[in-house]
């Protein structure tokens, strides 16, 4: 019996794709990488993943796990391999608000996890551009960072427990929800970031955090990275570590982006050596309730401290005035002073 026949016997005819049905799994969306898998399998449970791994292992056929298929580095190249799609392992099994954890399958789309956590007033703080298609298994396999890594760390910092299937089809049950667990070897962190080379991650216990009540976002220009770091440290000090994102964009990056996206506008009238996209997120009512002037305190803190960084050359001047809590804007872009700062704010639910 062939490998494909064995897989169909274990999973069902419709769970094993061949020929033209594999087109979506035969390359990345850029078209730079192309390959021809032996087949694509779509298991719907940990037990079915075990069956796939046992069959492939006995036939010495490689297996390439595939998550959201959003990578750009050819990491899922699978010529002649069984490509194991995690898309059907998509159950959000449990959100535990009192413990602030989520138990999820590896096929859960990141944006779906965000929505489930937010419905409980919580947040899973890993976020990036592909959140509408990236899946939890891919986050774990690559130890994804995203834009909020400064405050919350990489994915591994938000994982309490894992379930994974080894090459020979055995289940590793590491599904603890304990925050303090110093018993023995830490296989969890060995698997996170291993990109499917050690085992196929099938489930996870993830940390959740309190959902921020208000945000303030700004694009800031500086003369050097050192000046930008002065601003970062000042903001961390005055907000108690509320800086969620601090994205460095050098002039070369901005030039390339604008060339590729002619519909976009530059944030400043003239090119800047150092461009920083930053965001603060606060959870306390004190920092998220508008004052008498209507300005949310976190926005005022960002405006005031980024403005004072003008003494070092960063954020000199403010463009567009003060955007208030109901502004409904994520990013303010100054267009009058060449070098400057614009701040936008929003509260939860806006």
Image (cartoon, grey):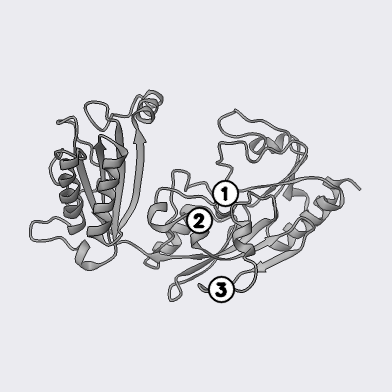
3 or 2: tag closer to the N-terminus: 2
Taking 120 as reference, is 335 left or right? left
Tell me the residue at 64%/37% (across/down).
24
1 or 2: tag closer to the N-terminus: 1
Q: Looking at the rendering, which quadrant does residue 191 occupy?
A: bottom right
Q: Nearer the viewer, mark 3 or mark 1?
A: 3
Which residue lies under the disc numbered 2? 155
Q: Which of marks 3 and 2 is in front?
A: 3
> Is 269 rendered above or below residue 147?
above
Residue 239 lies, in percent from the top left, at 24, 59
Taking 191 as reference, is 150 left or right? left
Residues under labels 3 and 2: Cα distance? 18 Å
> Is 285 rendered above or below residue 257?
below
Which residue lies under the disc numbered 3? 181
Q: Looking at the rendering, which quadrant does residue 83 occupy?
A: top right
Which residue lies under the disc numbered 1? 142
Q: Quadrant of the C terminus?
A: bottom left
Tell me the residue at 40%/65% (across/down).
209
Residue found at the far left of this picture = 292
Q: How crowded is mark 3: few (under 14 residues within 10 Å), some or many (20 or more)?
A: few
Residue 182's disc is none
């Amino acid at each position: 019996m062939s490998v494909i026949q064995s897989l169909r016997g274990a999973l069902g005819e419709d769970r094993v794709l061949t020929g033209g049905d594999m087109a979506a799994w035969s390359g990345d969306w850029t078209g730079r990488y192309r390959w021809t898998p032996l087949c694509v399998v779509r298991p719907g449970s940990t037990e079915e993943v075990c069956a796939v791994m046992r069959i492939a292992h006995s036939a010495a056929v490689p297996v390439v796990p595939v998550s959201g298929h959003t990578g750009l580095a050819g990491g899922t190249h699978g010529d002649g391999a069984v490509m194991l799609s995690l898309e059907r392992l998509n159950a959000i099994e449990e959100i535990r608000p009192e413990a602030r954890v989520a138990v999820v399958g590896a096929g859960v789309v990141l944006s779906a996890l965000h929505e489930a956590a937010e419905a409980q007033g919580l947040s899973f703080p890993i976020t990036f551009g592909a959140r509408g298609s990236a899946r939890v298994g891919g986050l774990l396999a690559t130890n994804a960072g995203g834009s909020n890594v400064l405050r919350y760390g990489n994915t591994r910092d938000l994982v309490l427990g894992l379930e994974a299937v080894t090459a020979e089809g055995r289940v590793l049950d590491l599904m603890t929800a304990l925050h303090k667990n110093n018993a023995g070897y830490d296989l969890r962190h060995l698997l996170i970031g291993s990109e499917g080379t050690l085992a196929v991650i099938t489930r996870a216990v993830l940390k959740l955090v309190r959902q921020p009540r208000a945000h303030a976002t700004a694009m800031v220009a500086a003369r050097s990275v050192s000046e930008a770091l002065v601003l970062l440290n000042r903001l961390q000090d005055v907000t108690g570590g509320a800086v969620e994102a601090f994205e460095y964009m050098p002039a070369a990056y901005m030039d390339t982006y604008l060339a590729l996206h002619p519909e976009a506008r530059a944030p400043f009238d003239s090119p800047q050596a150092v461009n920083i996209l930053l965001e603060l997120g606060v959870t306390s009512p004190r920092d998220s309730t508008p004052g008498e002037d209507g300005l949310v305190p976190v926005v005022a803190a960002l405006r005031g401290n980024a403005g004072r960084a003008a003494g070092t050359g960063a954020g000199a001047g403010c463009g567009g005035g003060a955007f208030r809590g109901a502004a409904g804007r994520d990013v303010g872009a100054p267009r009058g002073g060449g070098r400057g700062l614009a701040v936008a704010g929003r509260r939860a639910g806006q």
